[in-house]
Amino acid sequence: MDGRRLNPRFDLWNHSPTGFEWGYGGSGPAQLALAILADHCQDDEQALNFYQRFKWAVIAELSHRSWTLTTEGIDRMLDSLRDCNRAWTVCVRAKT
C-alpha cells in the first residue's frame, strides 16, 4: 500500500472488531484477508468470494515477525484460487 491505513471493511463483514491478526486461521486473520482483498481487487463481491480461502492459503501462514505481500503475489494467489474454484465447479457439474 502507499502508506495509508488499511480499511478493515467492517461494512462487508465484522469478524474482528479488535483488529487484524495473522499467523493462524481465526477471526483477526479473516478480517485482514477481507480487508486486503477488498483493497486489492476494488471489488467487494470478489473479496467476499475469496477471502476465507485467501486467509487459509496466505494470511494463516504469515510469520508473526515480519511479512510483505506484493501486488504480484496477491494476484498469483487469486489466480490459483480461481483455478481451484473453476476445477471444483467442473467436478461438481460432472457429478450431477
Image (tube, rainbow, N blue to C red):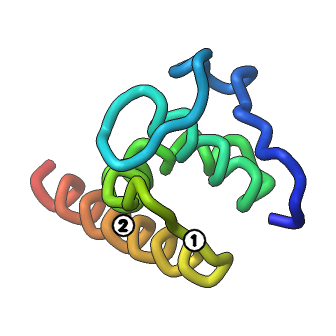
Q: Are marks 2 and 1 in contact (CB under 8 Å)?
A: no
Give the residue at x 25% y 60%.
88
Q: Which quarter of the figure is the N terminus placed in?
A: bottom right
Please, which residue is most extreme toward the left here?
95
> Which residue position is annotated with label 2?
86
**What's the residue type where badge 1 is placed?**
Thr
Left or right placement of residue 57 versus residue 65 in this view: left
Q: x, y (%) of residue 59?
A: 42, 53
Nearest the viewer among 12 and 61 is: 61
Q: x, y (%) of residue 30?
A: 47, 36
Q: x, y (%) of residue 70?
A: 63, 77
Give the residue at x 58% y 71%.
69
Left or right placement of residue 47 versus residue 15 in this view: right
The number of numbered badges drawn on the structure is 2
Above or below 18: residue 78:
below
SS of the residue at dot 1?
Answer: loop
* Front tag of 2 and 1: 1
> Which residue position is annotated with label 1?
68
Give the residue at x 77% y 45%.
6
Whichever of callouts 2 and 1 sits on the residue coming sooner in the sequence is 1
Mark 2 → mark 1, Cα distance in angstroms:
28 Å
Above or below 69: residue 6:
above
SS of the residue at dot 2?
Answer: helix
